[in-house]
Amino acid sequence: MRVLMVAANQEQRPDPVVPLGALYVAGAARAAGHDVALYDACFDGEGWRDALAAAIARHRPEVVGLSMRNVDDVAWPRATAWFEYYREVARAIRAEAPEASLVLGGSAFTLFPDLFVGALGADFGVVGEGEATFRDLLQDLAGHGRPVRDFPHGPSGDPRLLYATVGRGRLPPNEPALDLADLATYQRLGGAANVQTKRGCGFACSYCTYPVLEGSRVRLGDAERAVDQIERMYRERSITRFFVVDNVFNVPASHALAFCRELESRRLPLRWTAYVTPAGLRQEVAEAMARSGCSGVEIGTEAAHPATLAGLGKSFGVADIESASAWFKGAGVKVCHSLIFGGPGETFETMDSTVAVVDGTRPDAVFAMLGVRLYPDTSLARKLEAEGRIRREDIGLEPIFYIEEAVRDGIIEKATAIGAERPHWVFPGLDNPDMDRFTLRLRKLGVRGPLWELLARRPGARSGETPA
Ligand code: B12
């Protein structure tokens, strides 16, 4: 069949992100013999309508797969929600390709399948990972014009929703259709290309969606195959910056080490970044990451006080945060802490403690969110539902945030004061016009890598130093 994948994401902050999920699904459809094209809206701004219409006219799809990544930017109080935009994109697809089946997918869709499938008037939606289910759906549509196999339909029983079965064991050897993406533009405009070495997350953080999205069992991919992808992107497309998109790169350590050893052995002049957790981190892993070209890590610290770490369900302590930061910095890897202020157990005193600990680790950058974005099927949301503080239907496409009572009045002022003394800290929920101008200027000068690695160059930033 002729299939057009539409990657709708236009978010450019903190960096534009290659639509890896859509490329994986495109790769699986192509491997099954379908004629697949991609329309990526990322850099088209308002021009997406004409560009989408042109892509549809060119490819004349029988099936359109609409990939939706972000519901919103989780940036309270200035949060941007993308739902209306997705609805416009779905309408435009229907108008330009009225005969085509419209199939939804992506992390935004997977978090709220019932809401999206209804509001966007789609024919089908694949909940969870797309490769196998989309391929099976295409086969049914090609052969019978409708799904004939026994797809699981999930809790609501909506026949349009096709739930992917989370596999066990190792990941199947799917290859993303990287040739369809304009990787050079992503790299030029600041981002990086991306690569995934495993799926799933075995941690049980109270607010987090990763187990909902990818399953709570880690499934390893082949480390050598991931490095092959990287090497191909380097040799064939001159890509030199990568983001490893695994939920947590350093767990399990054996897999992280296998990836690093393989990458190091290829001796390529590359730089890469990943998310890591302090939980169970080994110095040996930090050093192996550095040797293989890791230039920076985003540490999922979230808080640095025992009470708030407990409230967020983190499985590490303050000492782990300190040693993780020291090991990475010691190995020459830049450190960015990601923080959430206002979670369960937060007070102004715990905020002060977190800031003091984080300052003490001399980070290169800090990304701090205010409030905890609530998602269905997380333990925090279930607890609040059980206590009668929210209803499940309150959690929807317009983000709602948990902000601990004790800091609700004053958290914005407090965060503003913290940020004012620390140019290398970013609160995405607060206005940052200076920073936007600053990063744009660096991008124009051709500076690459994740936005936060640029913060150390910000005027007045004493990256890695504790403010006076
Ligand atoms: C890595 C990551 C990042 C990195 C990306 C680096 C890079 N260069 O790629 C960075 C740090 C930059 C980042 C930033 C942000 N992120 Co982020 N990120 C992730 C993470 C951990 C992995 C994403 C990924 O690449 N997955 C791998 C691909 C292969 O999976 P996938 O896209 O889901 O695709 C699969 C399925 O969804 C499905 N599928 C996808 N499309 C389609 C289409 C069809 C038709 C079908 C059938 C199926 C299908 O099949 C695919 C293959 O199995 C996810 C969490 C997660 N586990 O999903 C959050 C996540 C996507 N991010 C999220 C958010 C909010 C953001 C930010 C807005 C945060 C911020 N304010 O800074 C920004 C936005 C950036 C942008 N430009 O869009 C949210 C989105 C949900 C929401 N609330 O909206 C997530 C889900 C985390 C969360 N909070 O729950 N992120």
Image (tube, helix red, strand yellow):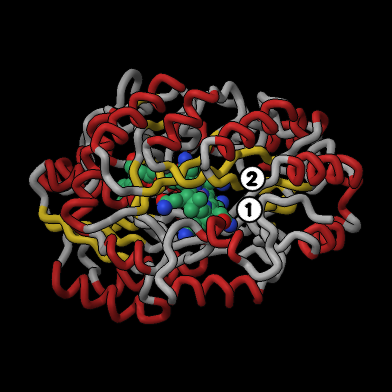
At mark 1, the secondary structure is strand
Disc 1 C-beta below 8 A from ligand 1: no
Which residue type carries mark 1? Ala
**Residue at horizontal 69 percent and vertical 71 percent from the top:** 431
Mark 1 and mark 2 residues within 8 Å of each other at the beta carbon = yes
At mark 2, the secondary structure is strand
Say above or below: 79 vs 115: below
Circle number at residue 273: none
**Residue at horizontal 40 percent and vertical 46 percent from the top:** 272
Label 2 packing within 10 angstroms: few (<14), some (14-19), many (20+): many
Residue under circle 1? 365
* Foreground pick, 96 / 437: 437
Say above or below: 78 vs 306: below
* Foreground pick, 276 / 397: 276
Label 1 packing within 10 angstroms: few (<14), some (14-19), many (20+): many
Residue 458 visible in this rendered orientation of the protein: yes
Residue 57 position in % (x across, y down): 17, 75
Residue 280 position in % (x across, y down): 58, 21
Residue 160 visible in this rendered orientation of the protein: no
**Residue at horizontal 24 percent and vertical 69 percent from the top:** 98
* Foreground pick, 254 / 201: 254
**What whole-number distance in Å separates the C-alpha atoms at marks 1 and 2?**
7 Å
Give the side of residue 392 with respect to residue 200, left or right. right
Circle number at residue 337: 2
Which residue type carries mark 2? His
